[in-house]
Image: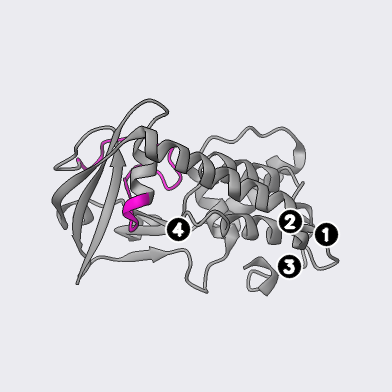
Amino acid sequence: MKKTLYHGSDHIIEKPIYGFGKPYNDYGLGFYCKESLDLAKEWSVGENTDGYANIYELETEGLNFLDLSDPQYNTLHWIALLLRNRIFDIKNDIARAGKEYILQNYSLPVEEYDVIEGYRADDSYFSYAKSFLNNTISVRRLSEALRLGHLGKQIVLISEKAFGALEFGGYETAPAEKYFPLRKERNEKARLQFLSDRSGSVTPDDIYLADLLRGGVSKDDPRLQ
């Protein structure tokens, strides 16, 4: 079975190179794609720099997928991946202990997979993750934030096998004057919705990082979804 993927970039990439790229992305070293052509175009542009949406076909048969939207995983599994790969500014004892706790209890064996599917931590979303680590927003609020903005999932090829299953299918251009404002608008809309959402009020059932550290919250607690 083949899946069409798009990769936004400031240049055309006919053959992605396994092992090449930035190791501090959300899910580590890999080739980051979308299933949405428009979102890939938004990713590709700078404020005054046009971009390209590279088009690929991925042969999925024989590949092992880690889909973080699967019910067996929750938001803390996503946080664990970010803590493993992104650089966080650890400012207090709760954040320091929380990082260790999440990595010990929610890390996933990503080395066993070829492809990871999950949320993208753009600037605003990464700031929400940092707020959770600093004990200022709950798991519920973080989960709500991840679903705002219609950013969809990113699909990341992480194994040499996955790179070998990818076939280039051309590209489409993305003018900055059109797609940069759309990207800004999408991000701002998600941020404002997060701030104004009435469901953002604190409830007795909310779980904060400090609650996890105190114990008594099981890994299958439905409030962690």
Mark earlier in primary sequence (4, 1): 4
Could you tell me if the residues under marks 1 and 2 are in contact, i.e. CB atoms within 8 Å? Answer: yes
Mark earlier in primary sequence (1, 2): 2
Instruction: Kindly identify which residue carries mark 2.
Output: 138
Mark earlier in primary sequence (1, 3): 1
Numbered disc 3: secondary structure:
loop
Numbered disc 2: secondary structure:
loop
Q: Is residue 24 left or right of residue 90?
A: left
Q: Is residue 74 left or right of residue 67?
A: right
Query: Main structural element of the magenta stretch: helix, strand or loop?
Result: loop
Could you tell me if the residues under marks 4 and 2 are in contact, i.e. CB atoms within 8 Å? Answer: no
Q: Residue furthest right?
A: 204
Magenta stretch: give its range: 17-38
Spatial CA span between label 1 and label 3: 18 Å
Mark earlier in primary sequence (4, 3): 4
Q: Residue furthest front?
A: 178
Query: Can residue 11 be seen in this snapshot?
Result: yes
Query: Can residue 207 be seen in this snapshot?
Result: no
Q: Amino acid at mark 4?
A: Gly
Q: Badge 2 local density, few (<14 within 10 Å), some, or many (20+)?
A: many
Q: Amino acid at mark 2?
A: Ser
Q: Is residue 21 magenta?
A: yes
Q: Nearer the viewer, mark 1 or mark 2?
A: 1
How many marks the image carries: the answer is 4
Spatial CA span between label 4 and label 1: 26 Å
Could you tell me if the residues under marks 1 and 3 are in contact, i.e. CB atoms within 8 Å? Answer: no
Q: Quadrant of the N terminus?
A: bottom left
Q: Nearer the viewer, mark 4 or mark 1?
A: 4
The dot on residue 217 is 3
Instruction: Kindly identify which residue carries mark 1.
Output: 202
